[in-house]
Amino acid sequence: MGNDHPLKDKIQELLLEAGIDKTDCYNRMLDYTIEIFENQGLGRNYYGYHNIDHELEVTYLTLLAAIREKQLQRMSLNDVEYLFTSALFHDFDPQKSIDRPHEESVIQFISLDKESKKLIAEANLDIDIIKALILRTSYPWTGEFKLRPEKQMKECFQTSKITQDNPQMQTHYEQLGWFLSVVDRIGGYAIGNFPDAMEKAKKNAHAFAWHQSNIVRMSVNYFETLLNKETQMCRRVLHALPSEMRKNFMDTVLSFMNLRQQEIRIESKFEFENQKFETKVDSIEERNSDEYLDSLTQIYKELPQPLQFQKHSFAQSILDSKTIVATLRLTDGNDTIVGYAKGGPLENYQLYADVQDENFGQKNTIFLEPIAMKMGYWGLGGGTRLRKVFSLLANNQRYRYLTSFALRDLIQKRMGSENVEFVTMIDPEHWDYYRVDLLRGIV
């Protein structure tokens, strides 16, 4: 059950440590948030970045940092209470249609939801201040993402009796909102090691519909913007966190920068040193070696978790005669495998519960698992080559249809030039199931 979330006890301990005398109210607020997220399918099993894990990680880190700020007499106990509540509700959008948070939807929900309003009132907090702090978490805080929420923040300040016609208090809560915004973005990157951070980056990429080739580059840009353009608040937040969390965050930043350098070196080899890809269709005999299985397994593990089909029988499925495997290799003299396309009869797969394929059981459809490549080789054309080779092989084996999953934007782009149709559109992930009629053209 959602109320067993591992961060729940830690958050409750921090509430006691802060010296808050309304802990019962805040504990019920915490339980209610977890329950809503779980009931709406946004619990720990939801792969999108903005699930209950993110909500509670931000709440936990906000409390940690705010308590330290209170100890340094830079915040009051009331500030801690406002930050806790705003962090807990900052992505409170149970009806979301996309993973990326929509602050206006959050504001609308807590304004209309009777239980949320009741709990905020019991805590003796001003809901307009809560709204203002949540609006400040809009990202990036530039252009249209700043203009509208900033205007709405001013409206909240004029409605609230605490800040009405009080520029000094408005500035104070603007600073608290900025504090929350930075904690939100440091978030889970300060908890856990680099593999944990990479998995979060992949989730974040999913929320923003970034192509795999952009994950590292955009992550580096994300961190550089935080460190270089919001230096003052970023330093303040990091200094308020425990030293091991500061180290986790900075190690993560450096690891992403190192990966970006590796990507640039790879791109340079293809651009200036005549490095090329070649595709190869691998027979059962070629697949039946420890080296081959290990190479594909390591690449498979780099896929985001929801893209890891046949997780408990991956090696076994490679050796299945009905499985088609095409590998992407470097012309480096060693035939180094850097990617693969793999799939088999649709009936061999257990798809997501909300995907119903009318061809299941007809034995006329091949399922293409998400194409996998080593980090650094995305965006160089290898994925397209693998997909076309796989489609030709499926056509040669008399399959009528090919199905797979892809981001909605990518499917829509291909619909203009290829014979692609949606079978099931999955919200809020926008990771949709599509079909291609192989008799009407190879994808």
Image (cartoon, grey):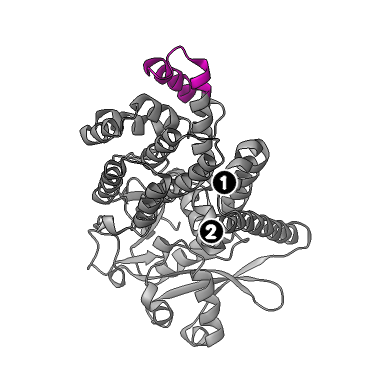
- Seen as rendered, the residue at the extreme right is 272
The amino acid at mark 1 is Ala
Q: Residue at x 41, y 76 (%)?
A: 314
Numbered tag placed on residue 351 in the rendering: none
Residue 302 at x, y percent in the picture: 52, 66
Residue 318 at x, y percent in the picture: 43, 79
- Under circle 2, the secondary element is helix
Label whose residue precedes the other's in the sequence (1 or 2): 2
Q: In the image shown, does 66 or 318 lie closer to the viewer?
A: 66
Measured in 3D between alpha carbons, the distance from the residue under mark 1 to the one under mark 2, in whole angstroms, is 24 Å
Q: Which residue is mark 2?
A: 198
Do residues under tags 1 and 2 come within 8 Å of each other at their CB atoms?
no
- Under circle 1, the secondary element is helix
Asked whether residue 208 is in view, the answer is: no
In the image, residue 205 sits, relative to residue 168, either above or below, namely below
Residue 165 forms part of the magenta stretch: yes
- Seen as rendered, the residue at the extreme top is 165
Numbered tag placed on residue 240 in the rendering: 1
In the image, residue 362 sits, relative to residue 150, either above or below, namely below
Residue 205 at x, y percent in the picture: 50, 49
Question: Which of the image's four quarters has the N terminus?
Answer: bottom left
Residue 309 forms part of the magenta stretch: no
165 displayed left or right of 363 = right
User: Tag 1: Cα neighbours inside 10 Å, few (<14), some, or many (≥20)?
Assistant: many
Q: Give the magenta part as a residue range.
A: 147-171
The amino acid at mark 2 is Met
Residue 44 at x, y percent in the picture: 34, 57
Q: Residue at x 38, y 19 (%)?
A: 160
Locate residue 352: give its quadrant.
bottom left
